[in-house]
Image (cartoon, rainbow, N blue to C red):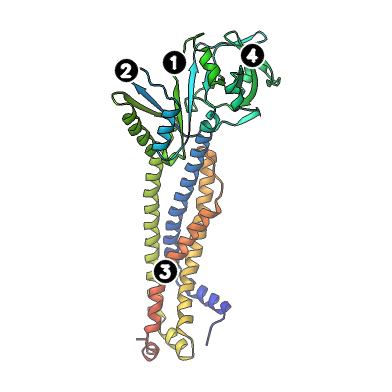
Amino acid sequence: MPLSPLDLSLTTLRDLTGNWVRSGLTALGIFMGVAAVNATLNIDTIANRVLQEQLAARDNPNITPWVYGRSLPPVEFDQAAIAEIQAAVPGIVSISRVTQLWESEVQYQGKITDSVDALSVSENYQRTTGRQVLEGRFFDPEDFNSFRPVAVIDTVLAQQLFQAAPPLGEGIFINGTRFTVIGLIETKNLDGSEEGEPTGTLWVPEPYGSLLRGRFYYYQGEIQIAVRSLDDFQTISDGIEAQLQQMFPGYEIYIYGNVEDLYEEEQRQRASIRVLKAVGLLALVIGGVGIANITIAAIMERTREIGLRRAIGATDLEIMAQFIAEAALLSLIGGTTAVATVHGLTKLATTTVFEAPYEFNWRDAALSMGAAFGVGVGASFLPALRVTQIDVVQALRGE
């Protein structure tokens, strides 16, 4: 006689509550496995969010090569050299030239600041760095072609010079030369770190910066090479170094990246997460072994019941469903309890022990529960399949 869904549920509950210790230990095994998996996923999610916040505080991932020769002439990265690098190394998004102008003093209506980073940049600088313009605009081709004395400043320098007044259209003096402010840009530390307070930055078009070189001390310009993603950082760095060695034989090549520390941190995190995931999966497998054992024990203890049900018309599938349902229910109990417990502990830890960006992630919870059901149902399937091989007459005899 087939069981209705309600009867199947009641029978499953009766069988599981008939042996609290065995059912509890099996659910505990699933709990530990799911807890390990869910905690690992939470750690991975938190680490990725922290990494993204650190990346957002910096310019786009980029690489700055230094080419140095003791007795060789300095290297100038002209358009031909830049094009050759970009064609030879895949994964490069953009390359821009940057020259830092030292000993720069900025003045506006009696307010003077000499702690400022002054840069002359090429047209695609904004694409390379990803800096967002908050007001006004960045440089356009006409600014470069017409040698316009225009400047873009960041929010720190705007606060120093203008306080709350709008800076656009105002004239500022850089070492006595007047520049018109055409844009306000977000502030980020130029060295790629979050340590220390930014001192203020301004940018001028590269052609006009070249005219100023004779007016005050400057160092040789450099190029910034934006990479596609943090994952590509090391591969592209190696490719750039190899290409520069080919282009400039006899020179020493040094590679600096604004996200080098974050790349190394990400690699360490990935290695740690792989270990934690392996531990979580091992715990799940142990829980699955417990599910298989309880299913085998249940089949052996209820041999007469199985024979009687088959004798009165129950199909093999219906009998298998009963044992698989028991495993699924234990997986549900253990998995749900594990997800709720890990969420509570993670929330407590990220608010009282250390600050970290954490929110409940339904995707991670679903993956954890899916793993629980997969292991539970999978582990119970083969023992439940043995039900179909039991001889009815022998089962009724309890053999």
| Label 1, label 3: how far apart the Cα atoms are | 67 Å
Name the residue that disc number 1 marks: 219
| Label 2, label 3: how far apart the Cα atoms are | 69 Å
Which amino acid lies under the numbered mark 3 shown in the image of this protein? Gly
> Crowding at label 3, few (<14), some or many (≥20) Cα neighbours within 10 Å?
some
Name the residue that disc number 3 marks: 378
Contact flag, marks 4 and 2 (Cβ < 8 Å): no
| Label 2, label 1: how far apart the Cα atoms are | 16 Å
Name the residue that disc number 2 marks: 72
- Disc 3 is placed on an element classified as helix
Which amino acid lies under the numbered mark 1 shown in the image of this protein? Tyr
- State the image coordinates of residue 293 (x, y, percent, origin top left): 37, 70
> Crowding at label 4, few (<14), some or many (≥20) Cα neighbours within 10 Å?
many
| Label 4, label 1: how far apart the Cα atoms are | 23 Å
- State the image coordinates of residue 146 (x, y, percent, origin top left): 60, 20
Give the mark, 4 or 3, whose residue is nearer the N terminus: 4
Name the residue that disc number 4 marks: 172
Q: Is residue 139 visible?
A: no
